[in-house]
Image (cartoon, rainbow, N blue to C red):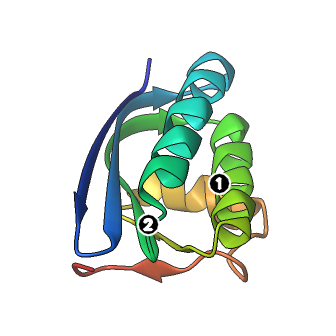
Amino acid sequence: MAETEFSYKDGTLKIYISGEIDHHSAFKIKDVIDSQLLHYSPKVAVMNFEKVTFMDSSGIGLVLARYKFAQNCGTSLYVQGLNRQTQRVLDLAGIKTIKEITGGDI
């Protein structure tokens, strides 16, 4: 089961995801992330996957839908901390042209 933690500072909302992202957990955490995006209305949001141990295709939907939701809120969304497995899942989905990845701090 995936867990989420948030921190907000200077217009940036950091979203730390840990655990396993599957259909069940993705459905639960999407609402939590969306509510934080609406609450803070950040200029930038960063989804950090460093502590994600497993991600299936549900993670693709999670990232895509949060990307579109953030855009509609006027927020730039970045993804960081992808390990080999999570990077591969996103690459196989062919979405690397719309996700923005950073290796450093934002």
From the viewer's perspective, tell me whether residue 48 is left or right of residue 56.
left
Percent position of residue 6, x then y: 29, 45
Is residue 105 positioned above or below 12 on the image? below
Most foreground residue, 14 or 26: 14
Q: Quadrant of the C terminus?
A: bottom left
Quadrant position of residue 98: bottom right
From the viewer's perspective, tell me whether residue 17 is left or right of residue 9.
right
Is residue 33 positioned above or below 37 on the image? above
N-terminal of the pair, mark 2 or mark 1, is: 2
Cβ atoms at labels 2 and 1 below 8 Å apart: yes
At label 1, counting other C-alpha atoms closer than 10 Å, the crowd grade (few under 14, some 14-19, many 20 or more) is many
Element at badge 1? helix
Most foreground residue, 13 or 104: 13
From the viewer's perspective, tell me whether residue 87 is left or right of residue 58.
left
Amino acid type, residue under disc 1 in the picture? Arg
* Residue drawn at 58 percent across, 59 percent down: 88
Q: Which residue is mark 1?
A: 66
Percent position of residue 92, x then y: 73, 61
Quadrant position of residue 19: top left
Q: Which residue is mark 2?
A: 45
Percent position of residue 94, x then y: 79, 69
Element at badge 2? strand
Most foreground residue, 51 or 40: 40
At label 2, counting other C-alpha atoms closer than 10 Å, the crowd grade (few under 14, some 14-19, many 20 or more) is many
* Residue drawn at 63 percent across, 42 percent down: 59
Distance, label 2 to label 1, CA atoms, is: 10 Å
Percent position of residue 97, x then y: 72, 83
Furthest toward the right, the residue is 94
* Residue drawn at 70 percent across, 36 percent down: 58
Amino acid type, residue under disc 2 in the picture? Ala
Q: Quadrant of the N terminus?
A: top left
From the viewer's perspective, tell me whether residue 67 is left or right of residue 105.
right
